[in-house]
C-alpha cells in the first residue's frame, strides 16, 4: 500500500470532522457528538500517521528511530477506546452509568498508551522499519511486549465492539440495525487483521517467516475494516438527520394550505424576504407556524363556536375519529371566519369586540387543520355555503 492508500481515507475523515466541527463548538456538552468527533479525528490520525511517508517524516523530525511505531500504536488504542465510548453513548441509558463506563474505558486505554510508551523507551530499535516493524522486532525485549500489548488491546476492543453491536442489532430495526450490522462486518475485517498480525509475530517466535501476512495483508484488511466500520457509524446518524429534515420539510409543506388560507387576514403573511431561502427547515416551520397563529388571532372575533360544533358533529357522522373531527371543525371555522372578515373590510366586528386573549378550547393540530382544508367534505360544505351554518 502506498501513501495514497492511507492519505485518501485520512482526508475523508478530516472532511467529515470539518463538517461536524461547527456543531461540536455549538453543542460541546453533547456526549454523543463529542464521541463522533473524537472517533473521526482519531481515525484520520491513524491513517495519516501510519502512512510510510509520514512515518519517515516523524522519525526524521524527532530524531528517534521508529518513534512512529508507539505513536501509531497509541493512536490505534485511542481509536479503539473512542469506538467503545461512542457505542456506549450512542446506546444511551442512565447518564451516571454512561459516564462511569466512559471514564473506565478512557482510563483503561490511557494506561495501555502509557505502557506502550514506557516499553518503547525501555527497548532498542536501531534499524528503521517502515512496514515490517512488528515482525522485525518480534523477538526484541520490551518491544516484543509492546507489540503484544497493542495487539491485545485492539483484540479486546474488537471483540467487545462485535459483541455489543451484534446484541444491539438484534434489539433494534431500520437504519440503526443496518448500521450496526455494517459495523460488525467491518470488525470482522479488523479481527482478520489481528489474526494475520498475531500469526506473523508468532511465526517469528517459532523461527518461521510469515512476514508478508503482517506487511501486506494486514494493512489492507485494516483499511477495509476501518472504512466499512466508518460507514456503519455514519449511516444511521446521517439517515436520521435526513429523515428529520424530510419530516420537517414535510410539515412545512403540509402547513401550506392553512398558511395560504390565512394569508389575506394576516399582517405578517406575505412579507417577502423575512427569512433567507437557505434558512434551516426548523426555522422555516417555526416562521410558518407563527404566521398561522398570528392570522388566527386576528380572526378570533369572527370565530363561530356554533358553526364549529355543527362541523364537528358532521365530521363524526362522516366517520372521522374525534381528533380528526376536531381538526376538520377548526378548519371549517377558520374558513368561515376568513370569509366573514372579507365581508367586513372596515373591521366593525373587530372594533366592537373585546380585546382577544386567545382561544380557550386548547391547542389545535395545525397540520391536520391544513390537510382538512383540502380534503374534508365538511370544510368544502362551508366553502360552498359561504359561511352559512351547517345543519
Image: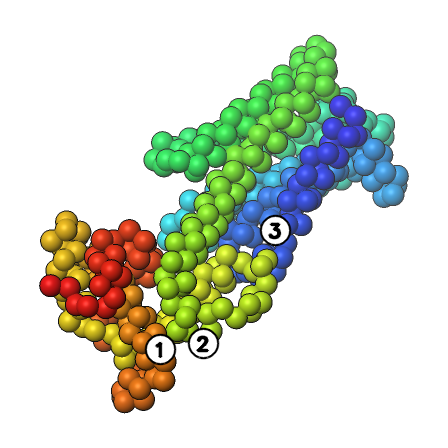
Circle 2 packing at 10 Å, graded few (<14), some (14-19), many (20+), is few
Please give the name of the residue rendered at 59% of the width and 27% of the height, measured from the top-left corner.
225
Picture layout, residue 96 above or below residue 240:
below
Which residue carries the number 3 mark?
A: 20
Sequence order check, earlier mark of 1 and 3: 3
Outermost residue toward the top in this view: 208
Check residue 298 in the rendering and tell me which mark sits there, or answer none. 1
Q: Is residue 323 visible?
A: no
* 302 left or right of 192 in image: left
Residue 196 % position (x, y): 63, 18
Q: Which of 19 and 131 lies nearest the eye of the viewer?
A: 19
Residue 251 % position (x, y): 40, 54
Which residue carries the number 2 mark?
A: 267
Callout 1–callout 2 Cβ contact below 8 Å = yes
Front: mark 1 or 3: 1
Tell me how far mark 3 sits from mark 2, CA to CA.
39 Å
Picture layout, residue 44 above or below residue 339:
above
Residue 53 % position (x, y): 83, 33
Sequence order check, earlier mark of 3 and 2: 3
Please give the name of the residue rendered at 36% of the width and 84% of the height, measured from the top-left corner.
346
Which of the 4 image quarters holds residue 234?
top right
Amino acid at each position: 500500500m502506498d501513501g495514497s492508500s492511507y492519505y485518501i481515507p485520512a482526508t475523508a475523515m478530516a472532511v467529515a470532522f470539518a463538517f461536524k466541527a461547527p456543531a461540536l463548538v455549538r453543542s460541546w456538552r453533547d456526549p454523543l457528538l463529542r464521541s463522533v468527533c473524537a472517533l473521526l479525528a482519531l481515525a484520520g490520525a491513524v491513517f495519516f500517521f501510519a502512512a510510510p511517508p509520514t512515518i519517515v517524516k516523524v522519525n526524521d523530525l524527532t530524531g528517534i528511530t521508529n518513534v512512529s511505531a508507539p505513536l501509531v500504536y497509541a493512536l490505534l488504542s485511542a481509536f479503539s477506546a473512542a469506538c467503545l465510548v461512542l457505542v456506549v453513548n450512542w446506546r444511551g441509558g442512565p447518564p451516571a452509568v454512561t459516564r462511569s463506563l466512559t471514564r473506565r474505558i478512557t482510563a483503561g486505554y490511557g494506561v495501555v498508551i502509557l505502557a506502550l510508551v514506557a516499553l518503547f523507551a525501555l527497548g532498542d530499535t536501531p534499524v528503521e522499519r517502515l512496514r515490517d516493524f512488528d515482525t522485525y522486532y518480534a523477538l526484541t525485549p520490551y518491544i516484543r511486549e509492546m507489540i503484544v500489548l497493542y495487539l491485545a488491546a485492539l483484540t479486546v476492543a474488537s471483540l467487545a465492539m462485535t459483541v455489543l453491536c451484534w446484541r444491539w442489532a438484534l434489539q433494534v430495526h431500520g437504519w440503526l440495525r443496518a448500521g450496526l450490522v455494517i459495523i460488525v462486518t467491518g470488525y470482522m475485517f479488523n479481527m482478520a487483521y489481528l489474526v494475520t498480525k498475531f500469526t506473523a509475530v508468532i511465526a517469528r517466535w517459532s523461527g518461521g517467516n510469515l512476514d508478508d501476512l503482517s506487511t501486506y495483508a494486514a494493512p489492507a484488511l485494516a483499511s477495509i475494516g476501518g472504512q466499512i466500520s466508518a460507514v456503519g457509524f455514519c449511516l444511521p446518524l446521517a439517515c436520521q438527520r435526513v429523515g428529520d429534515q424530510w419530516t420537517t420539510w414535510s410539515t412545512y409543506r403540509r402547513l401550506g394550505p392553512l398558511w395560504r388560507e390565512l394569508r389575506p387576514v394576516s399582517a405578517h403573511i406575505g412579507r417577502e424576504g423575512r427569512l433567507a431561502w437557505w434558512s434551516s427547515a426548523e426555522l422555516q416551520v417555526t416562521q410558518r407556524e407563527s404566521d398561522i397563529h398570528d392570522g388566527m388571532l386576528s380572526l378570533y372575533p369572527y370565530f363561530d363556536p356554533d358553526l364549529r360544533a355543527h362541523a364537528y358533529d358532521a365530521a363524526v357522522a362522516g366517520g372521522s375519529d374525534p381528533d380528526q373531527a376536531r381538526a376538520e371543525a377548526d378548519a371549517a371555522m377558520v374558513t368561515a371566519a376568513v370569509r366573514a372578515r372579507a365581508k367586513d373590510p372596515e373591521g366593525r366586528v373587530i372594533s366592537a369586540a373585546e380585546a382577544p386573549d386567545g382561544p380557550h378550547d386548547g391547542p389545535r393540530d395545525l397540520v391536520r387543520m391544513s390537510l382538512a382544508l383540502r380534503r374534508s367534505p365538511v370544510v368544502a360544505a362551508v366553502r360552498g355555503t359561504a359561511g352559512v351554518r351547517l345543519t
